[in-house]
Image (cartoon, helix red, strand yellow):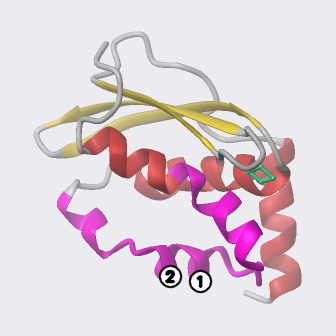
Amino acid sequence: MSEDIAYEVMMDHYRNPHNYGTIENATNRITEYNPICGDTVHLEMIINEGRIEDIKFVGRGCSISQASASILTETVKGKSISSLNDLTDQKYLMDLGVSLGPARERCALLSLNALRKAIAGDGTAP
Ligand code: FES
């Protein structure tokens, strides 16, 4: 995928976010924020038998952070928790397919960091 197309995909996720909303019977919830700008991503998910059965997000912030949250939910929905060990920061950023500077990388990784904390049990229990 060319970088131009990858950027268009990101902007489409920003304008039309996938898996946007909340899950009433979520097993794991977390709100993560970027302390530099205050932007937030809130994730809710159902984890059952080591698998992310469902995941949704709401948030407020820059296009990169919100598009990335939408893409992340699409990426991990239905996946086993153990398979996420391979999803390193660098792999996730490469999969996004757009070149980002260090500050924008933090925007893009906000939701992935939130997901890791929620899976580790750092989030608020329902
Ligand atoms: Fe705040 Fe991107 S500028 S997360």
Name the residue rendered at 48%, 58% in the picture.
75
Label 2 CB-ligand 1 distance < 8 A: no
Whole-percent x, y for residue 4 in the image: 89, 82
Q: Secondary structure at mark 2?
A: helix
Q: Which residues are magenta?
A: 82-111
Residue drawn at (84%, 78%) of the image: 5
Query: CA–CA distance between discs 1 and 2?
Result: 6 Å
90 lies left or right of 27: right
On the image, numbered disc 1 is attached to which residue? 94
Disc sitting over residue 61 in the figure? none
**Residue 63 lies within the magenta run:** no
Q: Looking at the picture, which amino acid does disc 1 mark?
A: Met
Q: Are marks 1 and 2 in contact (CB under 8 Å)?
A: yes
Say which mark, if any, is on residue 90: 2
Q: Position of residue 56 (x, y in %)?
A: 52, 32
Establish whether ligand 1 lies closer than 8 Å to the Cβ of label 1.
no
Choose top left, top right, bottom left or bottom right for residue 39.
top right
In the image, residue 56 above or below residue 93:
above
Q: Position of residue 11 (x, y in %)?
A: 86, 58
Residue at position x 24%, y 66% in the image? 83
